[in-house]
């Protein structure tokens, strides 16, 4: 009966035309998207501002590394408990609390800087706190999407949300630096606090139907998400691909400054390479905005991952900056396609009562690239940077091919809703 009801609902949705702008055609998602723009800019400033303030207080590069780790560790460690919270409580309320507390922390740091009381230790504590608040928000940010749109628009919702990060990757550092230069160090944290406060108000204005929780959503714990992922080959493979890519495939990002030296490109060339990868990621995101949930998601995702590895390996073998930029641009497109499709596939297939916990595990993968940079750096010492990064990239291609051969459910992923409707 449940399958019949679900098929009937899907059939009714398919009869209505999808809004021209996909997920942005839904008022709730538009408000969520604008709130996310404010949030992501604030997070970009958190990354840039923390390093800037730390350098002013103590120019030792050791402190820069310590502060970065202090922010990353709570985000990684608390992502899974935050997923449990996302399953047990209203996602919108969880995000409102997280954003509001982050705004307060920004205003508090602004007050410390204004009063001349800021120290490296205060920055360290502040970084841990903001990292924990980011962990609280991340699973809820992903889990709320099906409440904002119809599921047939989920691919564009994932893409539009990802586009914010891709754009901020390009303009965020410059925007944060400009903010510091224009308003001065004493006001910059306050302005960022205002951005988080605005995000909070926008989220509060979203009108959603009351969430009906099933009994089993109130029970269960952190391990339920792991058990489900381990028991479902498609989920295990999709999240495993993201973990594998973060640990090995993204090492080129960490070592990109070294390639600017190898190519005699200097600081300007380094900026061009960062921009090429970022623009490619943005265009890859735009390319899948209109991707339907009934397309061949699994094969497209694996093909994108395999292509990414080959393209980054080709980048490491480049002899000129221009050729390197081309491969970075294409690699950015490929990575954006398969990562966004991975998120889309999870959103379509995950049970509602485990959505937060599964998304909490997925969100961990985005913060593992910093961890993957360490073994890549060690390997670069022994093998040379191009060979070390090239082998790491090709390992992603090999892993994608192995998943194609070993996980038939990934090859079939896509078009399942049409099959359900036909069978019923």
Image (spheres, helix red, strand yellow):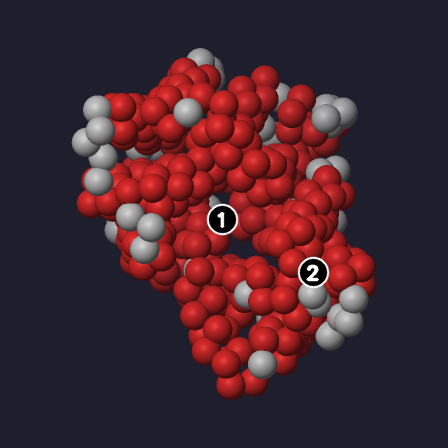
- Name the residue located 56 percent from the left edge and 49 percent from the top edge: 343
Up the image or down, 179 lies above or below 158; here it is: above
- Looking at the image, is mark 1 or mark 2 nearer the viewer? 2
Q: Is residue 183 left or right of residue 415?
A: left
Up the image or down, 105 lies above or below 347; here it is: above
- Name the residue located 36 percent from the left edge and 57 percent from the top edge: 61
- Label 1 vs 2, first from the N-terminus: 2
Q: Is residue 283 left or right of residue 196?
A: right
Residue carrying label 1:
350
Point out residue 48 in the picture as x, y percentages from the top left corner: 44, 41
- The image's mark for residue 296 is none
Mark 1, residues whose alpha carbon is within 10 Å: few (<14), some, or many (≥20)?
some
Give the image quarter of residue 31.
top right
Q: Toward the viewer: 48 or 301?
A: 48
Point out residue 380 in the picture as x, y percentages from the top left corner: 53, 78
| Quadrant location, the C terminus | top right
Mark 2, residues whose alpha carbon is within 10 Å: few (<14), some, or many (≥20)?
some
Give the image quarter of residue 10.
top right
Q: Toward the viewer: 421 or 35?
A: 35
Up the image or down, 80 lies above or below 109; here it is: below
Give the image quarter of residue 266.
bottom right
Q: Is residue 131 left or right of residue 158?
A: left
Residue carrying label 2:
265
Q: Toward the viewer: 385 or 407?
A: 385
Point out residue 225 in the picture as x, y percentages from the top left corner: 37, 55
**Which secondary structure, mark 2?**
loop
Q: Can the viewer see residue 83?
A: no
For marks 1 and 2, give the CA distance.
Answer: 45 Å
Q: Toward the viewer: 178 or 284?
A: 178
Point out residue 279 in the picture as x, y percentages from the top left corner: 70, 45
- Name the residue located 48 percent from the left edge and 53 percent from the top edge: 366
């Amino acid at each position: 009966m449940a399958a019949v009801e679900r098929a009937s609902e899907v059939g009714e949705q398919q009869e209505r035309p999808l809004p021209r702008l996909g997920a942005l055609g839904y008022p709730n998602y538009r408000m969520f998207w604008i709130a996310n723009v404010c949030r992501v800019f604030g997070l970009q400033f958190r990354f840039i501002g923390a390093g800037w303030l730390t350098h002013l207080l103590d120019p030792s590069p050791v402190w820069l590394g310590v502060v970065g780790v202090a922010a990353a560790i709570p985000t990684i460690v608390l992502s899974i408990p935050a997923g449990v919270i996302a399953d047990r409580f209203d996602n919108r309320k969880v995000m409102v609390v997280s954003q509001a507390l982050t705004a307060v922390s920004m205003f508090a740091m602004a007050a410390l800087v204004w009063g001349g009381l800021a120290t490296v230790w205060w920055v360290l504590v502040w970084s841990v706190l903001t990292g924990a608040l980011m962990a609280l928000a991340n699973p809820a940010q992903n889990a709320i999407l099906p409440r904002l749109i119809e599921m047939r628009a989920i691919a564009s919702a994932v893409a539009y949300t990802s586009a914010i990060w891709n754009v901020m990757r390009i303009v965020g550092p410059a925007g944060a630096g400009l903010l510091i230069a224009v308003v001065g160090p004493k006001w910059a944290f306050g302005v960022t606090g205002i951005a988080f406060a605005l995000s909070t108000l926008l989220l509060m204005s979203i009108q959603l139907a009351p969430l009906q929780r099933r009994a089993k959503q109130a029970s269960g714990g952190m391990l339920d998400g792991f058990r489900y992922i381990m028991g479902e080959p498609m989920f295990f493979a999709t999240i495993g691909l993201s973990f594998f890519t973060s640990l090995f495939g993204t090492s080129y990002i960490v070592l990109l400054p070294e390639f600017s030296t190898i190519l005699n490109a200097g600081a300007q060339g380094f900026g061009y390479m960062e921009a090429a990868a970022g623009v490619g990621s943005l265009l890859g995101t735009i390319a899948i905005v209109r991707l339907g949930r009934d397309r061949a998601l699994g094969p497209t995702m694996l093909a994108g991952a395999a292509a990414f590895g080959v393209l980054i390996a080709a980048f490491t073998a480049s002899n000129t900056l221009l050729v390197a930029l081309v491969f970075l641009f294409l690699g950015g497109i490929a990575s954006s396609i398969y990562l966004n499709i991975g998120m889309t596939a999870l959103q379509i297939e995950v049970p509602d009562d485990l959505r937060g916990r599964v998304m909490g595990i997925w969100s961990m993968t985005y913060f593992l690239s910093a961890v993957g940079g360490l073994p890549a750096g060690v390997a670069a010492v022994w093998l040379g940077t191009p060979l070390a990064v090239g082998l790491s990239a090709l390992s992603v291609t090999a892993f994608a091919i192995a998943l194609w051969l070993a996980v038939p459910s990934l090859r079939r992923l896509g078009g399942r809703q049409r099959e359900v409707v036909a069978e019923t």
